[in-house]
Amino acid sequence: MRKHVTLTIAVTVALLTGGATHACLWDSDTLATEAKGLPGVVDIIVGRFERNPPLYYEMRLERATKDIDTNPADLNAYDDAATSCDHLNRDDDAIDWMARKKAQLDDLTLPLKPDDRNDHTYRYYANLGTFFAHRWVKGGAHRDNLDDLREAQRLIAAAIEINPDAHFGREKFQLMAIEWLIDPAVGPEEIREDEPALANPPIVQMIPVTSDIDSTEAIKGMTGLIALGAAWQSVDIFESLGSHLRHAGHASLSYVAQLRAEELKAAGRASLHPGRKQYGGVYGAWIIDEYMEQIESYYPLARAAADQWLDRRTAYVLERLKAGRHPDTDPTFWDAWDDEPKLPEMPGLRSKLVASVRHDPTTLTGSLMIAGLVALLGGLYLRRRRRQRSASVAA
């Protein structure tokens, strides 16, 4: 349901609330992304980020397997082999590759520096936990058997214990998502599958907006889960992302995320919450009707541009893969890529407030509070000057 508010009310709400305060994989692509930073928030929401065809992972798996056969101590190759299997929906094989990596890590005679051993131990836990979570979801997300999710919870928690700041901080939110799947929160009233649809269903979100979760950090974490994990098809992540964007003062971006969630539901995707699969959106946009209409017009254009970009990229990649070239072994692989088309410009000033998750976004709330403070101090100063002039005239 849309909330029709005037700009004045929206500003007031922002000022009043301002003070209140799917998965991670490690392989060669992750390291490259860590080095250059994530794409912008809008790009991620509409799907303009790197994804590769199955042949890409088949060739990587073949290369990594040969590397391990030649050098069983090549720990990076185990990560590449395992994540390739994950992308190819070979979950058991992915888990098996991690067991083989663990055997190498347990070999204390392996000549590893302490920091390197620590880093690969972290990657082992992060990857393996992700594979268990993926296997549960791909296996049908059956709630009568949560063993894989509980193992994923244990492993991701162990990874965070070793390296809490990796992956743009997204693993903390991955763990929240897993814990929510194990024990889903509900709204003020328990939701049942047999209930009639509610006009205003309780807010049930995977990563809720609460006083102990920083929305700026949550935005960075969830966009990381989308761009580097498997959350591109997750209704729950996009709904949570929309709520945190709105809470951070980015109403237009929040509505873009909501439109992505609605697109997923229209395509047959549903929340993984066991009691709200039949419900619609769980939050409204806090922007005026005219602005909502601009975003609604922008969204399909941006999605079409993102899909066109991905189609061009996939064709480029496949042409070279079929010629026996792969970016893992060919440093010239991307030389002819022109990275077009760009997204159309998003309407409205507020769309520029979160240009990229590489930097902490400046929120609308903060900007308004600063502007209000400046106006207040300026008013007090002018009032004092008027009093001084009045006193001088009277003298």
Image (cartoon, helix red, strand yellow):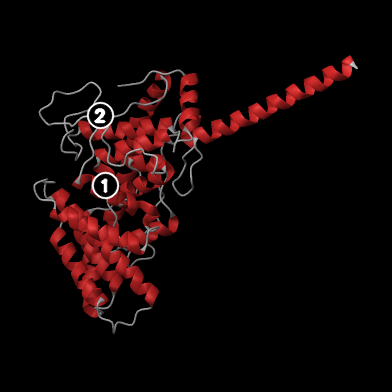
Q: Quadrant of residue 388?
A: top right
* Number of callouts: 2
Residue type indicated by callout 2:
Pro
The residue that appears at 22% across and 65% down in the rendered structure is: 61
Position above or below: 272 against 375: below
Residue type indicated by callout 1:
Ala
Residue 217: give x, y in percent of width and height.
41, 46
Residue 322 visible in the snapshot: no
Residue 177 badge = 1
Between disc 1 and disc 2, the foreground one is: 2
Residue 324: give x, y in percent of width and height.
26, 64
Name the one closer to the observer, 56 or 186: 186
Q: Residue furthest bottom?
A: 109
* Crowdedness near tag 2: few (<14), some (14–19) or many (≥20) residues, C-alpha within 10 Å: some
Residue 321: give x, y in percent of width and height.
26, 59
Q: Secondary structure at mark 2?
A: loop
Q: Which residue is mark 2?
A: 202
Gap in angstroms between the C-alphas marked 1 and 2: 18 Å
Position above or below: 352 against 311: above
Q: Quadrant of residue 303?
A: top left
Choose the circle earlier in sequence order: 1 or 2: 1
The residue that appears at 38% across and 37% down in the rendered structure is: 244
Name the one closer to the observer, 238 or 60: 238
Q: Secondary structure at mark 1?
A: helix
Residue 14: give x, y in percent of width and height.
47, 29
The quadrant of the image that shows the C terminus is top right
* Crowdedness near tag 1: few (<14), some (14–19) or many (≥20) residues, C-alpha within 10 Å: many
The residue that appears at 55% across and 34% down in the rendered structure is: 367
